[in-house]
Image (cartoon, rainbow, N blue to C red):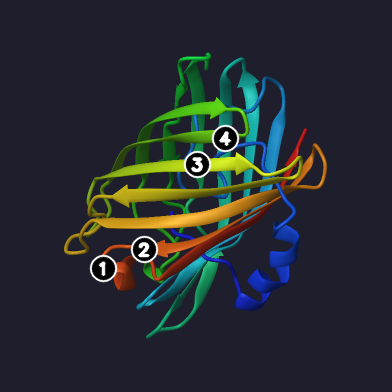
Amino acid sequence: MKKIVPTFALWFALCPLLLVARPVMAGPPFLTDDPEPVEYQHSEFYIATQMTKTEDGTEGTLPQIEYNYGAAPNMMVHIVIPYAFSDPENGSSESGLGDVELGVKYRFLQETAHRPMVGIFPIVVTSTGDDEKGLGNGSTQLFLPLWLQKRWGDWLTYGGGGYWINNADGAKNHWFLGWQLQKDISEHLTLGGEIFYSTEEAAGEGNSTGFNLGCIYNFNDHNHLLFSMGRGLSSNTDATNELSSYLGYQWTW
């Protein structure tokens, strides 16, 4: 999923706050995910915006809501409902319901002193968005990833990847790989970064590589602010990801 924050003014207004922050969980605000599910009978709720700018315009969600629930030990269910927008360079702006995302995360290997945590997180992205208006993919997608995670003191790293199955017109099945590293700076602040790679997602687009830098501010045990920003690194960045980011608020209970 491609990402960008709404305005530069908002980015800079948040910078002083973000410098005194810290995350507890993995996944958002990064593309790379982790194998750790929400604890049994606990919940996470996000309200967020994510956007991507390319030479063809800007697209994203404003807002999207995400809910994760620990439905069983080592397993959580997941849903994302986006209100999507598309603002092409040559064309009219559109907005409306985007493609709803459903998933189940299952951790099958616990972390030990010498072994990483391992889990799967299959995701179905429905075709509820209007692809003719640039608000959806036009066909249901399936993502089949494997994720690993390991902590050493204040350092946490996670990553892996999987295969996207996408039968929409002009789209190609493709691999996504990512790895993230983060450090607890203080009781409140964790800073992190990721690098990711995708094989060709559309005919003629080429493979792509990118990065994001981000952080999360924990107001307390239940309220968290998440932010990341990055861009592509490959030669086709203008067509895939000139600038992208994520801004979200998370409640946990």
At horizontal 42% and vertical 30% (from top left) the residue drawn is: 147
160 or 163: which is nearer to us?
160
Q: Earlier in the sequence, mark 4 or mark 2?
A: 4
- Which is more N-terminal, label 1 or label 3? 3
- What x and y, as percent, mark residue 184? 65, 40
Tell me if residue 212 comes above or below residue 235 in the rendering: above
Distance from label 3 to label 1 (Cα)? Answer: 25 Å
Amino acid type at circle 4 is Trp
* Mark 3 / mark 4, whichever is N-terminal: 4
Q: Nearer the viewer, mark 4 or mark 2?
A: 4
Callout 3: SS: strand
Label 4 element class: strand
Q: Which mark is residue 181?
A: 3
Residue 199, percent from left and from top:
24, 50
Q: Specify the farthest residue to the right.
A: 220
Please, what secondary structure does the residue beneath circle 1 have? loop
Residue type marked 2: Gly
> Which label is found at residue 232?
2
Q: Nearer the viewer, residue 91 or 12?
A: 12
Can you identify the residue that label 4 sits on? 155
Question: In terms of sequence position, does the residue under pointer 3 or pointer 2 come before the other?
Answer: 3
Crowd class of label 3 (few under 14; some 14 to 19; many from 20; radius 10 Å): some
For the residue carrying disc 1, how many other residues have a C-alpha within 10 Å: few (<14), some (14-19), or many (20+)? Answer: some
Pair 1/4: label in front? 4
Say few, some or many: other residues with alpha carbon within 10 Å of mark 4 (under 14 / 14 to 19 / 20 or more): some
Query: Residue 124, relative to residue 54: is it above or below?
Result: above
Residue at 55%, 34% in the rendered image = 156
Which one is in front, 173 or 28?
A: 28
**Answer yes or no: do the residues labelled 1 and 2 have beta carbons within 8 Å?**
yes
